Image: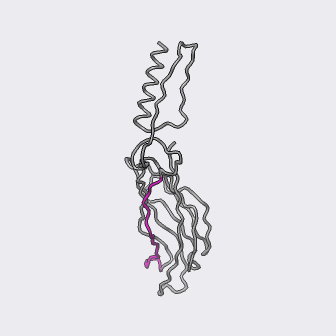
Amino acid sequence: MKKIVAALLSTATIAGIMATGTIVGAEQVIDGREGETSGDVLVRGIIGEFDNTTPGPNPEDLDQWINVTIPTTALFYTTKASNHTTITSPEHTITNNSAVGVIASVSDVETPVNMKEVDLLSVNTVGAPNVTTIDLFEDGEPTITASELFRLQGNDGVNAGKFGFTGKATPVNASAELNPTFKLVLSFSPNVA
């Protein structure tokens, strides 16, 4: 009976590996006390250029799984209804093209210009069940602590996440346009667990 259960579990494990990808570090125990003296090991390989958009075994460098589409520019602005003190933005999208999940993080802001009238600026997830808010600037100065923004599934699941900006401003002259800028540094890591 134990041999039958072990054989069924081994078959189910191998089928699971084939269906979902490689299980890194998975092991099986061959126990001679149970009458077992052999076992099967599924061997998978990669021949040719690794394609991170299709399921397959993990490459040696897991960062090769990263394949995302991000916007080249993003926008925030103040609202006339708030006398230009409330900051809002359109939605911006990050799409995971990889076959495995990806963790998207905000890691830094660089080269801020004309931020002195920005009292508070945050980046937020949009449309997610749990909203994540990451503070970027306070009183015109960067306050960013590297933080996870969201996790995206592989390209056969929920592979797009949306973000936007919120905050407060104190314009010196609300009738004149000021154009603050900075680079939002996003980082990505594969989520193959």
Give x and y (percent) for residue 81.
Answer: 43, 77
Give x and y (percent) for residue 66.
Answer: 47, 53
Residue extending farthest left: 156
Left or right: 113 as drawn, with respect to 81: right
Quadrant housing residue 112: bottom right
The reply to whether the magenta stretch includes residue 159 is no
Give x and y (percent) for residue 146.
Answer: 59, 60
Residue at the spot 57% in from the left edge and 57% down from the top edge: 147
Residue at the spot 41% in from the left edge and 52% down from the top edge: 159
Left or right: 5 as drawn, with respect to 156: right
In this picture, which residue range is highlighted in magenta? 66-83
Q: Is residue 119 above or below residue 157?
A: below
The reply to whether the magenta stretch includes residue 69 is yes
Label the magenta part by its dominant secondary structure.
Answer: loop
Left or right: 45 as drawn, with respect to 187: left
Q: Is residue 59 above or below residue 104?
A: above
Residue at the spot 52% in from the left edge and 56% down from the top edge: 188
